[in-house]
Image (cartoon, rainbow, N blue to C red):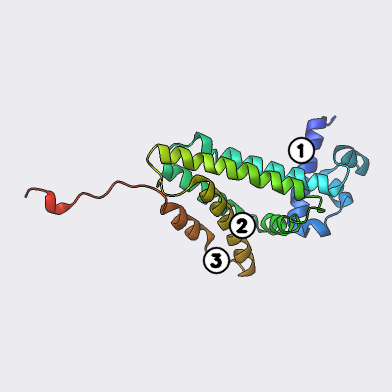
Amino acid sequence: MTVSDAQRHDAILDAAREVFRDVGFNGATLVRIAVTAGVTYAELVDEFPDKDALLHEVLRLRDAEDDERMDLDAITDADAALEAVVDMVRRNIESKGMVELFTVLAGESVSESNPGHAFFAQRYAERRERIARTYRRGAEAGVLRPDWDPDLSAVVLLALLDGLQIQWLLSGGEIDMVNIMRRHLNRQIVRPEAPDDSDVNA
């Protein structure tokens, strides 16, 4: 059966994600990824000339999948937005290898000479804007506290997400990322005050 270019492309990305997750970036080789994908080395490098390019596409695809599951622009309910973020944290817990890989690469990317510098700089800029837009919309709708500055809140949320992952990894999974994230976001939601029973006529 003839394999289409799209099928080959997807097979390479699926294999790369598996290999990167299992052995990390340094332990992964293009040859191993090609074998796992069921393609030749020549076919792989024709799609992705080096390991950096392949890794960045894997990370971009992972972000795109998260964005599709957690479409904050389409969510108008504050509690639904909270649960979408919490669900993303849960999925990360189930993909420890990818979390390790992302954490290492993000740290290395702070150097302007690092191949991933531009990728991560753009990634964080886009996510800050996307999250800030959600905060603005929530504040305007009266479901998020107006005293939480949208731009600052976006920076803090991303810092919390990444910082929790580092501590979670170093603690051997003892840090409860889901509960901490839920508590942080829950503080930002405006909820109707419970009626005062003393005002109710007997």
Task: State which mark lies toward you, 2 or 3.
Answer: 2
Q: Is residue 10 above or below residue 52?
A: above
**Could you give the CA–CA distance between mark 2 and mark 3, rounded to whole angstroms?**
13 Å
- Image quarter where the N terminus lies is top right
Picture disc at residue 10: 1
Q: Which residue is depicted at the point 57% across and 40% down?
A: 130
For mark 2, what is the residue? 162
For mark 3, what is the residue? 175
**Place of residue 73 in the rendered image (x, y in percent of width and height, measured from the top left):** 52, 35
Q: Which residue is depicted at the point 53% across and 50% down?
A: 152
Q: Nearer the viewer, residue 149 or 3?
A: 149
Which comes before the other along the chain, label 2 or label 1?
A: 1
| Disc 1 residue type (three-letter) | Asp
Q: Which residue is depicted at the point 64% across and 44% down?
A: 125
Q: Is residue 5 above or below residue 132?
A: above
**Is there a contact, CB below 8 Å, between mark 2 and mark 3?**
no
Q: Is residue 73 above or below residue 197?
A: above
